[in-house]
Image (cartoon, rainbow, N blue to C red):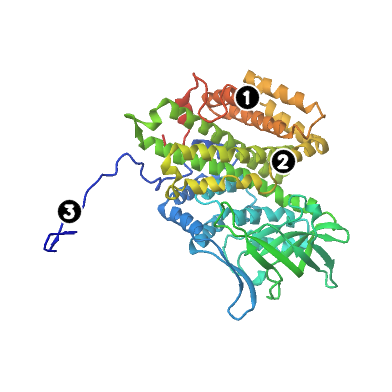
């Protein structure tokens, strides 16, 4: 609006500067489970019976509603209320309704403790696939879901406690709120391990536990990084007279009284913003011994092992989600007269990311299959699982940040904008490499397994050598790894290099046996023979990019 010399207003039409063209539509309304790599893995690992449910979850994951929940749960972060209006200590955390919606679906779909109450073969593979698909929409709420899944085998070290709590931990009912456990229809679990002075070195913990006359224990101390503090039960490490021990600590006692669980503050984290992580303080806090006194690490490692599996699943899922966004953008975006997906260099980048994703997904589902068979009494799979879980946790989680960063770059400035969802994937990417033991911790754990449990190496060897003779590059790489294993000197110094090579030969063996020839050939050439650069998008000439890109989730390329 302007005026004339005599101050009369003169209307002018609003300028029309441009139409929106050459932009990708939102990636919504699709089936996230429609992914040949995922579906083939589910069938191969024994859970074909789950595919109809997986597709149903996949369609819901890809819906506009669920994507809105994911955005809202991260923009409206959890809020700590230490006291009520009258000054009473309450130590509660409030979540946005979108978070509760995500949790409700996850629990009702059996992605938490439900597999432990289901004796069907392949049930842990089914749960793994569902977890991968659903958590690709929003990863933060997967933390309490994962811990609830993982707590059951550890709790079984004390049959009486397991009998009391396992039926509610395996429930498919999401029942939030702090109430007496027996009054709820479903329970969620967490863990309290690390302390500020020790971190990973849990034997430096100073939290103490003293036996009470009623058979319970009283804990006093602090924890440094306890996620999901609104969960109902926690496995907590504390120093008992007999040594570091594991205790079950409920937020609310059986009689309905609040247990002392003072939340000092919530962590201000890089990512994982929908999930509350806290620093709780214990002061005459009631707990019950789980397992043997002085054997706390041995007891809680059963829980840690299962959460490490979920770290592998989560990183494979996050890598696949980022790849899907990159491929979707490249399909619709045109540059210099051609779609990005048809341009040679972008095809190289996408194919390289697809190789990384396929190798991660295939390994994750193989570990899930071993978990399922080990739970059913297969000693060989149990031995394989001991080494493969630590190897997979190290490598798949280590590769996720680089892969997500490259996928984000495929979108250019669009990917750097919060509205795209890519920054959330990027902030989430380092988490699984830290949770349940950083890279160094897992690499050193592999060394311990090699020394203390030689049967785990024999099971690992059998898995790799199942592809023996099928690809000379794989055979050569495996001989080199065996040579490294035969040199004990400087083992700790070389631990990361060794675990990386163990992961790559295991992925190579799986792809040689189960993936199309073009995928296996490209993986062996670029990851085992070293015919590539240091960045993604450096696959050598002659690589069958088209065959690799055909493996992208349906409709993305």
Q: Is residue 499 left or right of residue 515?
A: right
Q: CA distance from mark 3 to mark 1?
A: 64 Å
Foreground disc of the pair 3, 1: 3
| Category of crowding for the residue at label 1, using alpha-carbon neighbours closer than 10 angstroms: few (below 14), some (14–19), many (at least 20) | many
**SS label for mark 3:** loop
Foreground disc of the pair 3, 2: 3
- The mark nearer the N terminus, 1 or 2, is 2
For the residues bearing labels 3 and 2, Cβ distance under 8 angstroms: no
Report the residue at 49% width, 18% height from top. 542
Q: Pointer 1: what residue?
A: 528
Q: Is residue 251 left or right of residue 35?
A: right
Residue 397 on image: x %, y % = 62, 41
**SS label for mark 1:** helix
| Category of crowding for the residue at label 2, using alpha-carbon neighbours closer than 10 angstroms: few (below 14), some (14–19), many (at least 20) | some
- The mark nearer the N terminus, 3 or 1, is 3
Q: Pointer 3: what residue?
A: 13
Name the image quarter holding residue 330.
top left
Residue 536 on image: x %, y % = 53, 31
Q: Pointer 2: what residue?
A: 440
Name the image quarter holding residue 194.
bottom right
């Amino acid at each position: 609006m302007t005026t004339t010399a005599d101050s009369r207003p003169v209307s002018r039409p609003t300028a029309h500067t441009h139409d929106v063209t050459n932009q990708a539509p939102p990636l919504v309304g699709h089936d996230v489970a429609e992914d040949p790599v995922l579906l083939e893995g589910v069938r191969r690992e024994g859970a074909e019976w789950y595919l109809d449910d997986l597709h149903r979850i996949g369609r819901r994951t890809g819906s506009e509603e669920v994507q809105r929940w994911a955005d809202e749960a991260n923009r409206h972060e959890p809020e700590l209320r230490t006291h009520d209006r009258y000054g009473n200590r309450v130590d509660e955390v409030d979540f946005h309704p979108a978070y509760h919606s995500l949790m409700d679906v996850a629990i009702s779909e059996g992605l938490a403790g439900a597999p432990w109450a289901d004796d069907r073969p392949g049930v842990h593979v089914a749960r793994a696939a569902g977890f991968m698909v659903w958590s690709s929409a929003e990863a933060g709420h997967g933390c309490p879901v994962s811990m609830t899944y993982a707590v059951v085998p550890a709790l079984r070290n004390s049959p009486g406690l397991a009998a009391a709590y396992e039926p509610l931990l395996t429930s498919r009912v999401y029942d939030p709120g702090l109430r007496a456990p027996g009054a709820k229809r479903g329970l969620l679990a967490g863990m309290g391990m690390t302390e500020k002075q020790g971190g990973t070195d849990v034997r430096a913990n100073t939290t103490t536990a003293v036996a009470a006359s009623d058979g319970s224990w009283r804990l006093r101390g602090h924890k440094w990084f306890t996620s999901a503090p609104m969960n109902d039960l926690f496995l907590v490490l504390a120093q008992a007279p007999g040594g570091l021990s594991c205790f079950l600590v409920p937020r609310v006692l059986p009689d309905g009284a609040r247990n002392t669980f003072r939340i000092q503050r919530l962590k201000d984290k890089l990512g994982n913003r929908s999930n509350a992580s806290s620093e709780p303080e214990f002061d005459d806090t009631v707990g019950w011994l789980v397992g043997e006194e002085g054997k706390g690490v041995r007891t809680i490692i059963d829980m840690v092992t299962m959460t490490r599996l979920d770290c592998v699943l989560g990183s494979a899922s996050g890598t696949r989600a980022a790849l899907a966004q990159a491929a979707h953008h490249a399909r619709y975006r045109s540059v210099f007269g051609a779609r990005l997906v048809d341009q040679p260099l972008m095809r190289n980048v996408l194919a390289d990311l697809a190789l990384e994703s396929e190798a991660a997904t295939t390994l994750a589902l193989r570990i899930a299959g071993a978990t399922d068979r080990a739970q059913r009494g297969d000693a060989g799979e149990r031995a394989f699982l001991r080494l493969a879980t630590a190897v997979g946790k190290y490598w798949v989680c280590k590769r996720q940040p680089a892969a997500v960063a490259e996928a984000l770059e495929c979108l250019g400035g669009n990917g750097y904008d919060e509205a795209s969802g890519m920054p959330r994937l990027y902030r989430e990417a380092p988490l699984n490499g830290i949770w349940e033991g950083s890279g160094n911790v897992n690499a050193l754990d592999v060394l311990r397994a090699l020394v203390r449990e030689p049967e785990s190496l024999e099971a690992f060897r059998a898995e790799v050598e199942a592809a023996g003779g099928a690809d000379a590059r794989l055979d050569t790489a495996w001989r080199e790894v065996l040579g490294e294993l035969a040199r004990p000197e400087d083992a700790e110094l070389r631990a990361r290099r060794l675990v990386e090579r163990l992961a790559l030969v295991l992925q190579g063996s799986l792809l040689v046996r189960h993936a199309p020839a073009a995928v296996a050939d490209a993986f062996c050439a670029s990851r085992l023979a070293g015919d590539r650069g240091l960045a993604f998008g450096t696959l050598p000439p002659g690589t069958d990019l088209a065959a690799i890109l055909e493996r992208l989730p349906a409709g993305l390329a």
